[in-house]
């Protein structure tokens, strides 16, 4: 792992409160320097209790635009919707803008195209003409996937588009996801991970045996990354 990657290892019982405070401090610094801040959030169960705590902090929430890292091909009202679940515990309680990847009026392919256009319209572009997201919050799956970039899927080789439909054969489903080009263009990344399986993945990456994990390309990038790991 490179010098731009730092890891904070905690007991699982401390994980949620520490992660919420760490996110708060990161967002506070951003809000002191900018009035239009872009944050991309991952779904799943890990961030939900953290966001429940985070919303209680006093921040200039109106400065923040929240985007999604990835999404399942379901409506917002579905219990599997990343956006829907975050909305219930966080978005509806903070005075920020948030943007779902899914619009039930459109196909998943069209939703991906529309979301890419949204990112280009809402977020400043870098010299490479790609949006620079201020902070992306990622997770790690037990198979080393991150966002909806799963092992052995076509999305891993995408080099131009920043939002795509990615077919996940091992789950027999399609998902919308951010791609490496925009993830690796972020100003900062925070990885939130819990459990022995994630610890094992990170240790394999550290000794150079994790090239088959999609998260490895991100960890070994030049982006400023902090990983908060909770283990028993």
Image: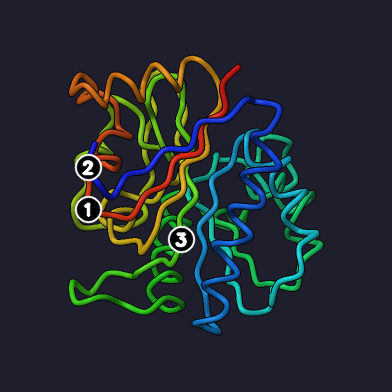
SS for tag 1?
loop
Relative image position of residue 94 (x, y in whole percent): 76, 66
The one nearer the camera, 115 or 201, is 201
Rounded to the nearest angstrom, the CA distance separating label 2 from label 1 is 8 Å
Kindly identify which residue carries mark 2. Answer: 2
Residue shown at 41% from the left, 51% from the top: 109
Which mark sits nearer the N-terminus, 2 or 1? Answer: 2
Q: Sequence-wise, which precedes: disc 2 or disc 3?
A: 2
Q: Quadrant of the C terminus?
A: top right
Residue at 66 percent across and 46 percent down: it is 75
**What residue is shown with label 3?**
135
Q: Where is residue 78 in the image (x, y as percent from the top left)?
A: 72, 39
> Could you tell me residue 116's position as x and y percent?
39, 64
Picture quadrant where residue 185 is located:
bottom left
Front position among marks 2 and 3: 2
Q: Could you tell me how many numbered marks the image carries?
A: 3
Question: Mark 1 and mark 2 in contact (Cβ < 8 Å)?
Answer: yes
Q: Name the residue under label 1.
A: 222
Q: Where is residue 131 in the image (x, y as percent from the top left)?
A: 34, 70
**What residue is at 60 percent from the left and 70 percent from the top?**
28
Q: In this view, does 66 lie to the left or right of 225?
A: right
Query: Which part of the image, by quadrant, shows the N terminus?
Result: top left
């Amino acid at each position: 792992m490179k010098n731009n990657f730092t890891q904070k290892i905690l007991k699982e019982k401390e994980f949620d409160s520490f992660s919420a405070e760490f996110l708060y401090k990161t967002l506070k610094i951003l809000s002191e320097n900018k009035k239009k801040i872009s944050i991309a959030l991952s779904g799943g169960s890990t961030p939900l209790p953290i966001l429940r705590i985070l919303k209680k902090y006093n921040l200039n929430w109106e400065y923040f635009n929240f985007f999604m890292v990835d999404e399942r091909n379901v409506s917002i009202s579905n219990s599997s919707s990343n956006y829907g679940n975050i909305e219930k515990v966080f978005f509806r309680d903070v005075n920020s803008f948030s943007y779902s990847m899914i619009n039930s009026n459109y196909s998943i392919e069209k939703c991906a195209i529309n979301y890419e256009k949204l990112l280009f319209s809402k977020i400043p572009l870098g010299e490479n003409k790609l949006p620079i997201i201020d902070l992306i919050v990622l997770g790690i799956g037990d198979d080393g996937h991150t966002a909806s970039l799963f092992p052995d899927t076509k999305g891993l080789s995408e080099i131009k588009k920043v939002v795509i439909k990615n077919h996940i054969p091992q789950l027999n489903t399609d998902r919308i996801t951010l791609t490496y080009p925009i993830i690796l263009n972020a100003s900062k990344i925070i990885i939130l991970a819990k459990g022995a399986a994630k610890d094992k993945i990170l240790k394999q990456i550290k000794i150079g045996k994790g090239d088959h994990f999609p998260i490895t390309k991100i960890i070994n990038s030049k982006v400023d990354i902090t990983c908060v790991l909770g283990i028993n």
